[in-house]
């Protein structure tokens, strides 16, 4: 018998397990994958830590969370400065003075602001009703057409006019030359990779891998007083009310016999015709852009293709539209009746979480338990 069974060894499950263990509780962590760390899992290939389930860049303004993760591992000072490739034209992301200069030839912040205002006025948008209108009101028509429209439609599989405006409210737009995508006080990548971070969090805790909780649910439920479940909430209830929808991502990984493919960790392909959304070159997440990176003679890239989720695929991004949000509320009502089960994390709460918010949520959950 255990006090707690934690289903899933991603960030949420691992942090909950650590805190419960430190509070004197007996804990077992299980995961259906053959590895810990969930979607932040990194694997060493050609001496490069490859982000197997998409790029993860840790960023936060929450000092409590930053102090927490740096207890377990050192972080480098990686700054996320993606590049947009529109049919061979390269633009700075976030949208900043470099972007506006390349797009319009403007030199001063005043000129850039005037250009955006002029295009917003021409579009006649006062109250943005969807993502397309929200984007144009933030950055004007030209930038929307070249750098947002194609990329976003590939990512979500829907026209921008059918997507809610809130998706793009976080879009960084700067009338400065600041190339840091995240407006975060603390940022970096764990030295040695995310798998090492999670392994350090789980140090001394019993973990069983390759074990499917839902296939042996009654057996596992009998092993613990309480369950912390971080899997998909609709899967827990055997999809009895229907499937919640997700966007999924497919990766094509390639080892290249060259030290440098694109010179940056992330390049977004923003035209509609290129089938992938972006290419990640994993070595540039490591500290040392030139000397250290070029010491490794090979490089590993991942092309990302966004797709509609279907059962059997890895669910990545909850589709938080009206229909799915209403369905989630019904599942949430069922979850509230499960007295010994706590539902948490991205899949358990059907919510898109940044990594720091996942950790903050896990820490808050444990405070209510102990």
Image (tube, grey):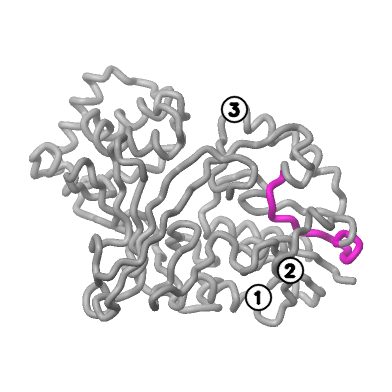
User: Which of the two discs, 2 and 1, labels the residue nearer the N terminus?
Assistant: 2
Kindly identify which residue carries mark 1: 202
- Residue at 78 percent of width and 72 percent of height: 27
CA distance separating discs 2 and 1:
9 Å
* CA gap, disc 2 and disc 3: 34 Å
Circle 3 packing at 10 Å, graded few (<14), some (14-19), many (20+), is few
Q: Residues within 10 Å of mark 2 (few under 14, many from 20)?
A: many
The image shows residue 119 at horizontal and vertical percentages of 21, 25
Q: Residue at x 49, y 68 (%)?
A: 42
Residue receiving disc 2: 29
Q: Is residue 275 visible?
A: yes
Q: Would you say 274 lies left or right of 159 here?
A: left
Quadrant of the frame with the N terminus: bottom right
Quarter of the image with the C terminus is bottom right
Question: What residue is shown at x 17% (from left), y 44% (from top)?
Answer: 89
Classify residue 163 as left or right of residue 275.
right
Decide which of tag 2 and tag 3 comes sooner along the chain: 2
Quick check: marks 2 and 1 in contact, CB under 8 Å?
A: yes
Q: Using the rendered view, name the quadrant where residue 46 is placed.
A: bottom left
């Amino acid at each position: 018998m255990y006090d707690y069974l934690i289903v899933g060894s991603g960030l949420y499950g691992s942090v909950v397990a650590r805190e419960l263990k430190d509070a004197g509780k007996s804990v077992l962590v299980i995961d259906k994958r053959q590895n810990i760390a969930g979607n932040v899992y990194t694997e060493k290939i050609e001496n490069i830590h490859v982000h197997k389930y998409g790029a993860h860049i840790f960023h936060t303004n929450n000092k409590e969370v930053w102090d927490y993760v740096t207890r377990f591992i050192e972080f480098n000072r990686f700054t996320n400065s993606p590049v947009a490739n529109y049919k061979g034209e390269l633009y700075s992301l976030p949208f900043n003075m470099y972007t506006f200069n390349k797009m319009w030839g403007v030199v001063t912040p005043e000129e850039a602001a005037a250009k955006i205002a002029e295009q917003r006025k021409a579009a006649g948008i006062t109250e943005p009703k969807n993502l397309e209108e929200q984007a144009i009101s933030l950055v004007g028509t030209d930038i929307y057409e070249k750098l947002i429209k194609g990329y976003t439609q590939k990512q979500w599989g829907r026209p921008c006019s059918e997507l809610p405006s809130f998706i793009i409210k976080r879009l960084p737009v700067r009338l400065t030359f600041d190339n840091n995508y995240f407006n975060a006080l603390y940022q970096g990548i764990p030295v040695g990779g995310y798998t090492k971070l999670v392994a350090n969090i789980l140090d001394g805790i019993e973990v069983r891998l390759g074990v499917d909780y839902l296939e042996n649910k009654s057996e596992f439920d009998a092993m613990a007083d309480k369950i912390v479940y971080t899997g998909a909430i609709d899967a827990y209830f055997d999809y009895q009310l229907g499937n919640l929808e997700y966007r999924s991502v497919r990766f094509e990984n390639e080892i290249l016999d060259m030290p440098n493919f694109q010179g940056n960790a992330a390049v977004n392909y923003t035209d509609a015709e290129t089938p992938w959304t972006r290419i990640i070159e994993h070595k540039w997440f490591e500290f040392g852009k030139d000397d250290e990176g070029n010491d490794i003679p090979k490089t590993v890239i991942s092309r990302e293709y966004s797709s509609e989720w279907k059962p059997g695929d890895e669910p990545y991004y909850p589709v938080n539209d009206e229909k799915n949000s209403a369905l989630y509320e019904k599942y949430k009502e069922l979850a509230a009746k499960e007295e010994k089960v706590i539902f948490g994390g991205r899949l358990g709460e059907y919510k898109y979480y940044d990594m720091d918010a996942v950790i903050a949520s896990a820490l808050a959950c444990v405070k209510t338990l102990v």
